[in-house]
Image (tube, grey):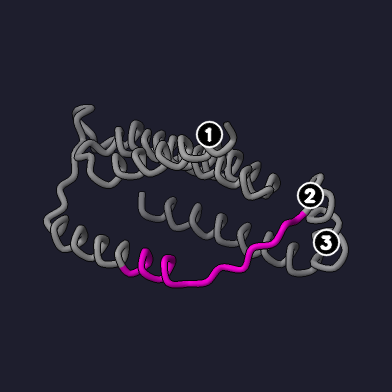
Amino acid sequence: MSELLFWFISAFTIISALIVVLNNQLLYSAIALLFTLFGVAGLYIYLWADFIAGVQLLVYIGGINVLIIFGIMLTNRISSVRLSQTNIQQGVGGVFALWVFIFIGLIISKTEWYQMTSAEPSSTVREIGTLLMTKYLLPFEAASVLLLGALIGAAILSREAN
């Protein structure tokens, strides 16, 4: 049952990612991106990366994708809902993606994989939180100050453009 659910989540993620890439309607691509990121969070759960799955849900789905959808819907230059984009290099990209897929498939099939049994971790959030607040506190705070500076700079630049 668990393996069947894994393959369902994988297929769901791949199909919604294909919709993101191949759809001509920008809003529908953004909504399909929401489902793709949700599927990736499900795959993180299968990897016992519960913290990364939570961050995926909160940051990417709850923040960035909603921001993209609001940006599309609230842009004042849009005169109709049918906003579309065209891609003239889909053939080249498709050939390159097929080549990469075959190359990765060959690597996976020719590699001798080391398999070992491991105990399922109870939770990774406690360990990550402890490391972020002790050993990696300075880099964590430096990254937050850097992101705050980027946010302030973006706000200043957007005010000067108008």
Figure check: 115 above or below 87: below
Q: Is residue 85 left or right of residue 9?
A: left
Q: Which residues are magenta?
A: 103-118
Q: Tag 2: residue type?
A: Pro
* Image depth: mark 1 or mark 3 in front: 1
- Secondary structure of the residue carrying tag 3 is helix
The residue at the far top in this view is 81
Residue 20 percent coordinates (x, y): 31, 42
Residue 124 percent coordinates (x, y): 77, 50
Instruction: Tell me the CA gap for discs 1 and 3.
Output: 32 Å
Which residue in the protein does label 1 denote? Answer: 5
Figure check: 55 above or below 104: above
Q: Counting residues from the N terminus, which is met first, the one under dot 2 or under dot 3?
A: 2
Residue 56 percent coordinates (x, y): 58, 45
* Image depth: mark 2 or mark 3 in front: 2
Query: Which quadrant: the N terminus?
Result: top right
Q: Is residue 46 left or right of residue 14?
A: right
Which residue in the protein does label 3 denote? Answer: 131
Q: Is residue 67 left or right of residue 131?
A: left
Q: Tag 3: residue type?
A: Leu
Which residue in the protein does label 2 denote? Answer: 121
Q: Nearer the viewer, residue 28 or 49?
A: 49
Figure check: 47 above or below 96: above
Q: Nearer the viewer, residue 161 or 36?
A: 36
Residue 122 percent coordinates (x, y): 81, 45
The residue depicted at 55 percent of the width and 45 percent of the height is 43
Q: Which mark is residue 98?
A: none
Q: Is residue 113 magenta?
A: yes
Total number of numbered discs in the rendering: 3
